[in-house]
Amino acid sequence: MTRIVSDPDTFVAEALDGLVLAHSQELRRVEGGVARRSSLAPGQVAVVVGGGSGHYPAFAGIVGVGMPAAAVCGNIFSSPSAGQAVRVAHAVEAGGGVLFSYGNYAGDVIHFGEAERRLRDEGLDVRTVLVTDDIASAPPTEAAQRRGIAGDLCVFRIAGAAAERGDSLDAVERLARHANDRTRTIGVAVSGCTVPGASEPLFEVPEGMMSIGLGIHGEPGIRDIPVQSAPELARTLLEPLLAERPQGAESRVALLVNGLGTVKYEELFVLFGHLHRELEQAGIAVTSPLCGELVTSLDMGGVSVTLLWLDDELEELWDAPAASPAFRRGAVVDAKKPDDAERPDPIAVDAVIEPREASASSRRAAETARDLLSLARGAVVAQADSLGALDAIAGDGDHGIGMSRGLAAAVAAASSLPDGAGLSTLLAAAGEAWSETAGGTSGALWGAALTEFGRVADSAGAQSGEAVAAAVTAARERIAQLGGAEAGDKTMLDALLPFDVALRSAIAEGAPVATALRQAASAASGAAQETASLRPRKGRARPLAEKSLGHPDPGAVSFALIVETLADWADADEHTEEQR
């Protein structure tokens, strides 16, 4: 487990602070992550990478000259927020545009996508290249759906080197995509990882077995096989990689053998030797290889193997000079000045919320919303461990932690507003804080849903049954639009859709809000449990569909938990009104 911890909630921030202190000649701390110490040349493309923490040296350790200019760092195994990505991009942008690159995970796609939209609205040219190297996460016919794991390093390195030599944004984007198309990875684990503050690993591998196809966020593998000797394991891992040799690829590769946390270097060298021999026997030359910890998963016992199929332009960039805390090539001559200029303070959440003149009913609704957010937080915190355990079956196990953090931030933001704030202002602040603090897919979706609910409810009369029903529908539509999920995909939407339908139906039939909410909450709870029979078609659980079967979706369960809590409150409030 992670043994050196002061507070799990501040673990990432403390780790980043320590990293920058240890490498102060190369890195500087910026709001939302880290950036290279020296400024970019005027007009240079700013390559900004990122994702959840817990993977050092990815992502902060590979920031530097000839590498990405900055890394956006989310919580452990959780995507950073859109606000973080915007602030980090501003910290390094030099007039040549911004290239975002990150692994293909739903939360990262949503948050970085929103950051790209905001930056484009400011007039910046921003592009995105997703990394999709994990061959175990989807078949070749669905390669665009694959997630990014250790191949992140290959794509980030090529993009950073191209930007360093002065290539245009068009060229940097093209080369990053070319590197991604030429990169394939597969991994194996013998033990799971444990997040800071937890006492149990996110998953366990049966004694004497190894799990093929694991993910770097603690997702278990897609199948278990008996433990193999090094020569056997080399063949097991290379066979599917070589079967996916890119069309037109030459017979030379950069071989990356990556320790995931607790496999020691001597063991990695043993495996590397057998892999190297197997490739030579297949007529494939190994050039400029890497062997060590490259993209880890906290204390996971495992290893991954990556092949970057090189051609002349990729090899030139792969071997170009570079200097970062964890990746170096050749001799770097960095003539740029250290960037010690004071940066503007991060934008406060309430500073980006447009205040609206609130009606009396909107102010009353805002007071109610404050209370309900606190109740929801209490309910989720009480069930955080069980939600995390459910998420760990076919995911990364952080759902309970993420929901708890998001709700805590939402409550704090709502409480910080003046008493006269209306519903839309309060829920916009709460939603922004939830998204900013929790990160991940659920953080983005809940944050957007709260904002949309408040906007529509305020416009429709705040607390009337019709206003509540209209706001729920709008929030549901926003979640579907942002997350791209549909009914049956085994997501929160499978509980939200029945909730929305039941609520609108009850309100249309003239039921009081409390009665309608109780009926809708019951529908959501039943639907959440029924997701156990579904196979996931979205998110991190998708590659582990068989393991997910028989277990309900954690997002649907947490949604049902929250609306059941709100229904209990409404029942009690209605009873109190009757007594009066």
Image: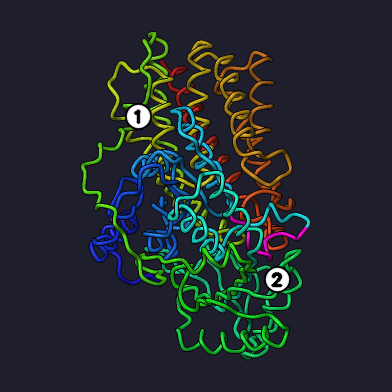
460 or 482, which is in the foreground?
482
Q: Which residues are magenta?
A: 131-140
| Residue drawn at point x = 64 percent, y = 63 percent | 134
Q: Is residue 206 above or below residue 90?
A: below
Mark 2, residue position: 250
| Residue drawn at point x = 68 percent, y = 65 percent | 136
Mark found first going from the N terminus, 1 or 2:
2
**Looking at the rendering, which quadrant does residue 244 occupy?**
bottom right
| Residue drawn at point x = 45 percent, y = 84 percent | 265
Q: Residue furthest right?
A: 141
| Residue drawn at point x = 59 percent, y = 74 percent | 305
Q: What's the coloring here?
A: rainbow
Pinpoint residue 28: horizontal percent, then vertical percent. Answer: 27, 54
Image mark for residue 376: none
Mark 1, residue position: 414
Pinpoint residue 79: horizontal percent, then vertical percent. Answer: 48, 50
Pinpoint residue 302: horizontal percent, then vertical percent. Answer: 54, 77
* Dominant SS in magenta: loop
Amino acid type of disc 1?
Answer: Ala
Binning the other alpha carbons within 10 Å of mark 1 as few (below 14), some (14 to 19) or many (20 upward) gives: many
- Kind of element beneath mark 2: loop
Residue 374 visible from this viewpoint? yes
96 or 85, which is in the foreground?
96
- In the rendered image, residue 222 lying in the magenta stretch gets the answer no
Q: Is residue 385 above or below residue 244?
A: above
Q: CA distance from mark 1 to mark 2?
A: 58 Å
- In the rendered image, residue 133 lying in the magenta stretch gets the answer yes
